[in-house]
């Protein structure tokens, strides 16, 4: 088993702290893949095996609400047997990789838990060793069954082959930046005959800041610099508003409840370059 931690990263200023938290793990990940056009190549790897995936596309919208796309790029380009997606504003406790490996020995995928914490009250070293109970739980209780609405991609793990088989993060949610992880939770629940429920594990868990970390401007975008010129199109039976001048589109409002992936990630539709940092 080899674990690749996939980080869709835009918030460059917090990446050194995030990597420090993984360097404190008792069992280190086999690889950390940062999917980002923004994170510089000069970051300190702290002895971790890290690579950065730079990407462009003329097909998928990049530059706003593209976290689902970044996660899919990391999954499809991973050389490891297992992937764990991890958001760029979080910190890892010292047992995250160890407990993720333990869950993988029993099942093919998992949804981890978030613990909200005021990062300003502790040093990074202290945060890495705090027990989960010191943070505010996102789902009450953890280690219990919840509806698929509780599936969050900030800490999700799966066999790479299963994540690809199930279709990854549905890109119909591009332009919304919400729902792509819950929809994946719903499809995986159906696949595993879990009746629309998911089990929220703790551990593994991730530290999530109480304060919102702002999104900076992206380094590369293929979107219009001015107002979009929209027209209506149909994708998988759903009406979307698609810009005539760029790849940007807006999905319909409300819950996008469908059994299959509406817009599947295709590797041929993105150009990816890989920077090995270690």
Image (cartoon, rainbow, N blue to C red):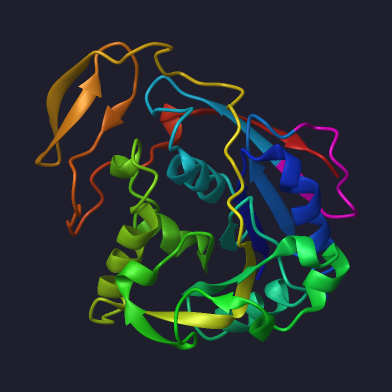
- Identify the main secondary structure in magenta: loop
In the displayed structure, 232 sits above or below 138; it is above
User: Is 8 situated left or right of 196 in this image?
Assistant: right
Q: Of 105 and 186, which appears nearest the observer?
A: 186
Q: Could you tell me if residue 3 is visible in this image?
A: yes
In the displayed structure, 59 sits above or below 83; it is above
Residue at horizontal 28%, vertical 72%?
A: 191
Q: Where's residue 233, x and y in %?
A: 13, 26
Which quadrant would residue 48 be assigned to in this image? Answer: bottom right
Which quadrant would residue 197 be assigned to in this image? Answer: bottom left
Q: Where's residue 107, x and y in %?
A: 49, 81
Q: Where's residue 19, x and y in %?
A: 78, 54
Count of numbered badges drawn on the protein: 0
Q: Quadrant of the N terminus?
A: bottom right
Q: Is residue 113 magenta?
A: no
Q: Determine the residue located farthest toward the left in the rendered image.
A: 237
Residue at horizontal 14%, vertical 41%?
A: 236
Q: Of 186 and 209, which appears nearest the observer?
A: 209
Residue at horizontal 18%, vertical 50%?
A: 254
Please report the bounds of the magenta region as a residue range.
Answer: 40-51
User: Is 37 situated left or right of 201 in this image?
Assistant: right
Q: Of 276 and 239, which appears nearest the observer?
A: 239
Q: Where's residue 153, x and y in %?
A: 48, 59
Residue at horizontal 34%, vertical 61%?
A: 182
Q: Quadrant of the C terminus?
A: top right
In the displayed structure, 236 sits above or below 4; it is above
In the displayed structure, 145 sits above or below 247; it is below
């Amino acid at each position: 088993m080899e674990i690749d931690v996939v980080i869709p990263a835009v918030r460059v200023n917090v990446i050194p702290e995030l990597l420090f938290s993984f360097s404190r793990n008792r069992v280190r990940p086999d690889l950390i893949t940062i999917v980002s056009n923004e994170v510089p190549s000069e970051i300190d790897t702290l002895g971790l095996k890290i690579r950065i995936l730079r990407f462009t596309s003329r097909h998928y919208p990049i530059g706003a609400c593209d976290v689902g796309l970044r996660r899919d790029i990391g999954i499809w380009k991973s050389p490891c047997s297992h992937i764990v997606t991890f958001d760029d504003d979080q910190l890892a406790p010292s047992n995250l990789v160890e407990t993720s490996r333990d869950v993988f020995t029993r099942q093919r995928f998992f949804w981890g838990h978030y613990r909200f914490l005021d990062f300003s009250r502790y040093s990074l070293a202290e945060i890495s060793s705090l027990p989960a109970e010191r943070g505010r739980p996102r789902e009450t209780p953890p280690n219990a069954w919840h509806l698929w609405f509780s599936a969050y991609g900030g800490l999700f793990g799966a066999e790479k082959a299963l994540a690809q088989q199930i279709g990854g993060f549905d890109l119909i949610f591009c332009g919304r930046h919400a729902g792509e992880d819950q929809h994946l939770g719903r499809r995986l629940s159906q696949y595993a005959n879990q009746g629309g429920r998911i089990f929220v594990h703790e551990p593994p868990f991730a530290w999530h800041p109480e304060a919102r970390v702002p999104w900076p401007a992206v380094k590369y975008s293929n979107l219009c610099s001015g107002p979009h010129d929209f027209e209506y199109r149909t994708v998988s039976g759903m009406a979307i508003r698609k810009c005539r001048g760029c790849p940007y589109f807006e999905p319909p409002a409300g819950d996008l409840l469908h059994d299959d992936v509406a817009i599947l990630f295709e590797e041929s539709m993105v150009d990816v370059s890989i920077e090995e940092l270690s």
